[in-house]
Amino acid sequence: MPARPHPRTGELFDSPVPPGTGWPGDPATPETPQAGDAAHVAQLAGQVESIAELDALISVCRACPRLVEWREEVAVTKRKSFADQPYWGRPVPGWGSATPKIVIVGLAPAAHGANRTGRMFTGDRSGDQLYAALHRAGLVNQPTSVDAADGLDTTDIRIIAPVRCAPPGNSPTTVERNTCAPWLDAEWRLLAPHVRVMVALGGFAWQIALRLAGEPVPKPKPKFGHRAVAELGPTLRLLGCYHPSQQNMFTGRLTPAMLDDVFTDAARHAGLSREGPPAAAR
């Protein structure tokens, strides 16, 4: 398939995008080591010393054959509405500050969202809702997240995920989650000294956040719920939020106002006092 122009820069790229070829925000180079199996992931993740290095390693990982095949197949076949665009088609690193006060725990990239754009929660309807709410809370500089060159920025948050490749049916296997886990553990090791609030998008993310925070977990074990709060130590608080999926938003299980409640709470608990735009209509 011929190279296609990036929708913002116009530069031509193959799908999937080879590392180091100029994709906006690509953290890797052609020389970045590619993890080939679970043991290699654990080895590289255990040695990483910076977020920039970690992002590069994640973005070229090839440790899960099924996920590699799927993400690259999607990048080639594409959705009809994006057929004129290149697809990132690689693992998606975390996005945001390397020293955040708030960490948002998601799930996995969407096949035609982050797998296309190369940035977490970018280019799909979940991202539309999430970044609009983050902007209303004053946590990002703009309300939209369209592609990796659109100018989105933050000094206060980072979005992470337990699985970095778009999985078939949005369902990674247990083995795939376990293979990917050392990347997340390394990310948390580097971020934890700065973080005051974790926001878990859904019940599975809540369990991941509790695992990352480590011991001691409060007893009884905190249960997930929208706007649920768990004190995980003297300086760390976990907040629950329904996932901003298209289904949750369409059915009204989650509304823009409910998202605003969570991120207003998160900003307050993190000590980020700032006046933002008016909250979404209730």
Image (cartoon, rainbow, N blue to C red):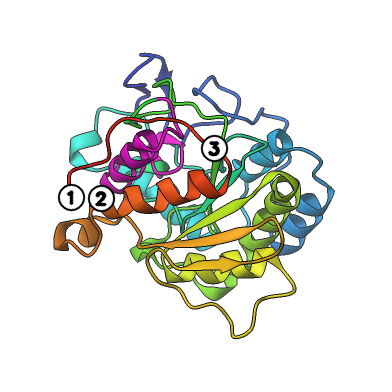
- Residue reaching furthest to the bottom: 220
Left or right: 35 as drawn, with respect to 246? right
- Would you name the residue on which mark 2 appears? 257
- Residue type, mark 1 in image: Arg
Compare residues 117 and 230 and report the one nearer the observer: 230
- Would you name the residue on which mark 1 appears? 282
| Residue 162 visible in this rendered orientation of the protein | yes
- Residue type, mark 2 in image: Ala
Residue depicted at x 35% and y 52%:
261
Residue 23 position within the rendered picture, expressed as x and y whole percent measured from the top left = 50, 23
Label 2 vs 1, first from the N-terminus: 2
* Image: 93 above or below 23: below
Compare residues 71 and 185 and report the one nearer the observer: 185
Left or right: 80 as drawn, with respect to 233? left
What is the magenta range?
Answer: 115-141
- Would you name the residue on which mark 3 appears? 272
| Crowd tier of the residue under label 1, counting other residues whose Cα lies within 10 Å: few below 14, some 14–19, many 20 or above | few
Residue 237 position within the rendered picture, expressed as x and y whole percent measured from the top left = 59, 59
- Residue type, mark 3 in image: Leu
Residue depicted at x 29% and y 44%:
129
